Amino acid sequence: MKPKDIFVKDMVVPSPTSVQNENVQHIDLPIVDLACERSMVIKQIVKASEEFGFFNVINHDVPHEIIAKMEEAGFDFFAKPVDQKKVAMAAGDSFGYGSKNIGINGDMGEVEYLLFNASVPAIAQLSKTISNVPSNLRSSVSAYTDAVRKLACEILELMAEGIGVPNKFCFSRFIKEVDSDSLLRLNHYPHNITNNNNNNKGCNHTKVGFGEHSDPQILTILRSNDVGGLQISLQDGVWNPVIPDPSAFCVNVGDLLEVMTNGRFLSVRHRVVTHSYKKKCRMSMAYFGAPPLHACIIAPPIMVTQERPSLFRPFTWSEYKKVTYSLRLGDSRINLFRNCTQVQCKRQVWNEEFIFEQ
Ligand SMILES: C=C1C[C@]23C[C@@]1(O)CC[C@H]2[C@@]12CC[C@H](O)[C@@](C)(C(=O)O1)[C@H]2[C@@H]3C(=O)O
Ligand SMILES: O=C(O)CCC(=O)C(=O)O
Ligand SMILES: [Fe+2]
């Protein structure tokens, strides 16, 4: 290996903070109306998960007060002075408050966040460090995670039914487990207002709030206020903005669900951008439904056929999580777990030789 290669490998390259001249194309996200007839809902969910990996759920039964209380608690927290927020700063694990740094591998964004493990004891513990009235925060966060977990289970059960898996609980059972590794993340994106001097009058500065990535878990249930910024990428290099709907939940397929449907449902890359013309901050609340660490992730037999052989090797969530956290935000993790087809194998050997010879 040349000295140059060692240097490049060890250097942490910061993520780009500005977004320029990108191909942005507006689309309408599929809508899943939970008030429709069950078979209709199932069809809507399956089609959206196959074609978009993302959909908006309307007419859900998560009570408005539970959402409003969680949102209020989030805004109250982010409105605190920085030194008070820093008391809840993420330490060894990544839970708690963070600002600009996403993960521990050098990713940055115009975002501040609060990350909770979604278990009852973990919520109680973090609430103590964050709030002067921990019991209020704890009850808002617990009520919200409880309600969105139920919604996630309902959607996962409809999905299982829709693709013909005999046990309709085969996906939802993971996030129902007491030791499920689910998370709740509040993201707050500041205004990004630039100095309005003569040089940049009329300019729209777009910055990266949360860089592009796929969600590693099973299913994400996202709710935001009415400020946009979320974009999904259905085609490499093309970004599709998602119109925010505070009365809906924006649901997306995570990497593990792509694996467990043997590639039938898509875990789609997405990101958040901030615009200088916006007068309000975006705040989103994302529930990431995950299995327990020891859970084995494998597609049920019905998803694997001769025409559609198994795309991924079995692994545990612990294994997948370890790889995820060792990589950058934008790195693809799912590809590292693909079964080696003959063509891929040849390419891998060729790549290894190529790297070795350099
Ligand atoms: C850079 C990183 C942050 C992240 C862990 C990772 O190493 C790669 C995946 C990132 C992500 C994206 C979706 C969720 O926001 C998140 C909580 C997750 O599970 O994976 C974050 C991780 C994080 O912020 O700790
Ligand atoms: O803030 C958002 O709207 C999306 C954030 C996100 O993708 C994430 O936290 O994984
Ligand atoms: Fe995400």
Image (cartoon, rainbow, N blue to C red):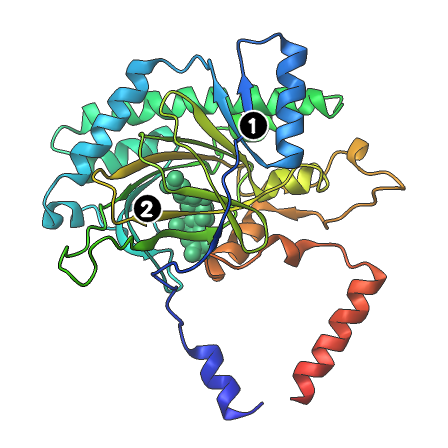
Provide residue 285's location: percent of width, then percent of height.
Answer: 35, 33
User: Picture quarter containing residue 268?
Assistant: top right
Q: Nearer the viewer, mark 1 or mark 2?
A: 1
Residue in the foreground of this view, choosing between 286 and 122: 286
Q: Secondary structure at mark 1?
A: loop
Q: On the rendered structure, is 352 left or right of 23?
A: right
Label placed on residue 95: 2
Is residue 51 at least partly visible in the picture? yes
Label 1 amino acid? Pro
Provide residue 251's location: percent of width, then percent of height.
Answer: 50, 30
Q: Is mark 1 within 8 Å of ligand 2?
A: no
Q: Is residue 113 above or below residue 36?
A: below
At label 2, counting other C-alpha atoms closer than 10 Å, the crowd grade (few under 14, some 14-19, many 20 or more) is: many
Q: Secondary structure at mark 2?
A: loop
Q: Quadrant of ligand 2?
A: top left
User: Picture quarter containing residue 257?
Assistant: top right
Q: On the rendered structure, is 54 left or right of 106?
A: right
Q: Quadrant of the C terminus?
A: bottom right
Task: Give me the residue at 83% from left, 45% from top.
Answer: 309
Is residue 297 at least partly visible in the picture? no
Reading the image, the residue beneath label 1 is 30
Task: Give me the residue at 35% from left, 25% from top.
Answer: 246
**Sequence-first disc among 1 and 2:** 1
At label 1, counting other C-alpha atoms closer than 10 Å, the crowd grade (few under 14, some 14-19, many 20 or more) is: some
Q: Quadrant of the N terminus?
A: bottom right
Label 2 amino acid? Phe
Label placed on residue 86: none
